[in-house]
Image: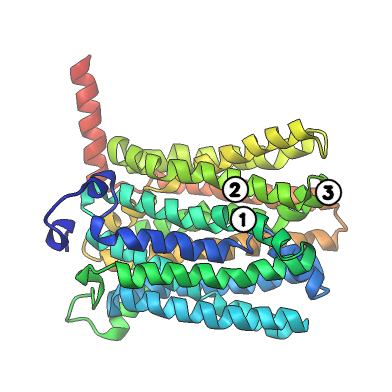
């Protein structure tokens, strides 16, 4: 269903790329993901402290959580096709709330098994809520503004996780007394934010195209749920698009594990400055998500992803890791320069936004299935990022490698993955995108 079919009157928001009928859903995603992001940049050291565990053990707990995110990210698209995005968003909210409470109670008890199980199951929550709404966006936004609409989705998604979530933590942790107790208090407040986000979306969005089944009436439930897997198996381009999106934000989630201790403790800037750095890095990402969506719509989706997203993010990641180690530890000017390096990574990461338009265009007759694979990869990036950290750090432990050497190996593994993505993006040609590129070249030739 087109945007025109939902609301015949185009508004200023529509022209900006935000479907007016979905406006409250965008705000809902921002608030929901802010709640999810409260813990994102102190969770690993917090778990080490309250559970009396090692960094490698905690990385395994986070990896299992990320595995749940991976599975839920696929199911969010498939179930949205089957039942409609609205119902899947409700499921995500309920799951998140129930298992967040159990997770926090387990931490209070100091129970590693209970905390691991509760955190794993909570991993099904945010993908169901956020990525099913992304499906809603794709069936509502007109094709000429689809990449821009996806860009606005990621403005809200990244605006919450980790940006505003970290900003909230900066204020909440000292408000609850600081230290481990302050961190625990901050995590309890995330329940309020997530509830507010759900309320905005549930009562604010009334676009009927998201209330029921999207998939063709002739397909069985099993066919709908497995459509993405079957499409990927028979369409190599969809598989490559899946892998590119999987690699996209994997380093982001990997750095959430290794950088908190490095920046706050090893380089002597403290937890507050680490959280401030995170806010700045992903504020840069927020500011450029919609921008790069527009760049892709105008100058070409594939080229934007390849040069801005892949190549730019690889350079930015190396800067974010090495610059803090090259400036004096604990110095104010060194911190500012390190933040600038991190912001470079955050900005370039936004260059991947047009992948949200490329994926459904790779399979025009099976857009829902293609989006299921896209959302799977988006959530799977959490799993890949944490899995890379877990694997590399555990291998480094076998060789008694220093912390710097082990973490550097993690960073270079991500750079290698970006190199693979660079090659694959070159193969993702779709008619809509190629036409824009040809038109632009024709205009340039005529101007000469």
Q: For the view shown, which residue lies furthest in the right direction?
A: 400
Q: Quadrant of residue 319?
A: top right
Comparing 146 with 405, the one in front is 146
Q: Which mark is residue 279?
A: 2
Above or below, 244 relative to 126: above
Q: Which residue is mark 3?
A: 266
Q: Which residue is mark 1?
A: 166
On the rendered image, what quadrant is the C terminus found in? top left
Comparing 381 with 108, the one in front is 108
Badge 3: few (under 14), some or many (20 or more) residues near its Cα, within 10 Å?
Answer: some
Q: Are marks 1 and 2 in contact (CB under 8 Å)?
A: yes
Above or below, 284 relative to 378: above
Badge 2: few (under 14), some or many (20 or more) residues near its Cα, within 10 Å?
Answer: many
Q: Are marks 1 and 3 in contact (CB under 8 Å)?
A: no
From the image, state whether disc 1 or disc 3 is nearer to you.
1
Residue visible at 43% across and 50% down in the picture: 155
Q: Earlier in the sequence, mark 1 or mark 3?
A: 1
Q: Secondary structure at mark 1?
A: helix
Comparing 278 with 132, the one in front is 278
Query: How was this image coloured?
Result: rainbow
Q: Secondary structure at mark 3?
A: helix
Q: Secondary structure at mark 2?
A: helix
Residue visible at 11% across and 56% down in the picture: 8
């Amino acid at each position: 269903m087109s945007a025109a079919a939902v609301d015949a009157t185009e508004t200023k928001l529509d022209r900006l790329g935000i479907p007016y009928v979905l406006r409250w859903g965008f705000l809902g995603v921002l608030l929901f993901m802010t709640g999810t992001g409260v813990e994102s940049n102190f969770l690993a050291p917090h778990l080490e402290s309250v559970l009396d565990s090692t960094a490698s053990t905690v990385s395994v707990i986070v990896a299992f959580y990320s595995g749940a995110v991976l599975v839920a990210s696929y199911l969010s698209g498939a179930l949205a096709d089957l039942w409609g995005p609205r119902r899947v968003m409700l499921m995500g909210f309920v799951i998140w709330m129930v298992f967040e409470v159990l997770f926090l109670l387990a931490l209070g008890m100091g129970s590693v098994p209970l905390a691991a199980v509760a955190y794993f199951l909570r991993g099904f929550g945010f993908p169901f809520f956020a990525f099913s709404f992304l499906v809603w966006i794709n069936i509502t936004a007109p094709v000429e503004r689809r990449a821009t609409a996806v860009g606005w989705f990621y403005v809200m998604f990244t605006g919450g996780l980790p940006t505003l979530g970290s900003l909230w933590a900066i204020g909440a942790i000292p408000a609850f007394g600081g230290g481990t107790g302050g961190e625990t208090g901050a995590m309890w407040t995330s329940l309020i934010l997530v509830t507010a986000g759900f309320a905005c979306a549930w009562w604010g969005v009334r676009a009927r195209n998201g209330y029921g089944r999207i998939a063709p009436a002739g397909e069985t439930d099993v066919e709908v749920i497995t459509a993405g897997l079957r499409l990927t198996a028979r369409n190599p381009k969809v598989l490559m698009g899946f892998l590119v999106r999987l690699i996209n934000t994997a380093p982001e989630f990997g750095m959430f594990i290794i950088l908190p201790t490095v920046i706050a403790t090893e380089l002597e800037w403290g937890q507050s400055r680490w959280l401030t750095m995170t806010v700045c890095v992903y504020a840069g990402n927020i500011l450029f998500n919609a921008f790069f969506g527009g760049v892709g719509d105008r100058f070409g989706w594939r080229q934007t992803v390849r040069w801005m997203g892949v190549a730019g993010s690889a350079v930015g990641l190396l800067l974010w890791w090495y610059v803090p180690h090259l400036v004096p530890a604990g110095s104010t000017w060194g911190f500012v320069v390190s933040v600038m390096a991190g912001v470079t990574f955050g900005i370039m990461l936004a260059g991947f936004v047009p992948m949200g338009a490329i994926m459904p265009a790779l399979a025009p007759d099976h857009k829902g299935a293609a989006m299921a694979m896209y959302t799977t990869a988006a959530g799977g990036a959490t799993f890949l990022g944490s899995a890379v950290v877990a694997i590399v750090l555990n291998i480094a432990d076998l060789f008694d490698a220093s912390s710097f050497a082990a973490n550097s190996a993690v960073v270079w593994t991500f750079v290698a993955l970006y190199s693979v993505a660079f090659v694959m993006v070159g193969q993702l040609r779709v008619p809509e995108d190629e036409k824009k590129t040809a038109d632009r070249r024709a205009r340039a030739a005529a101007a000469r």
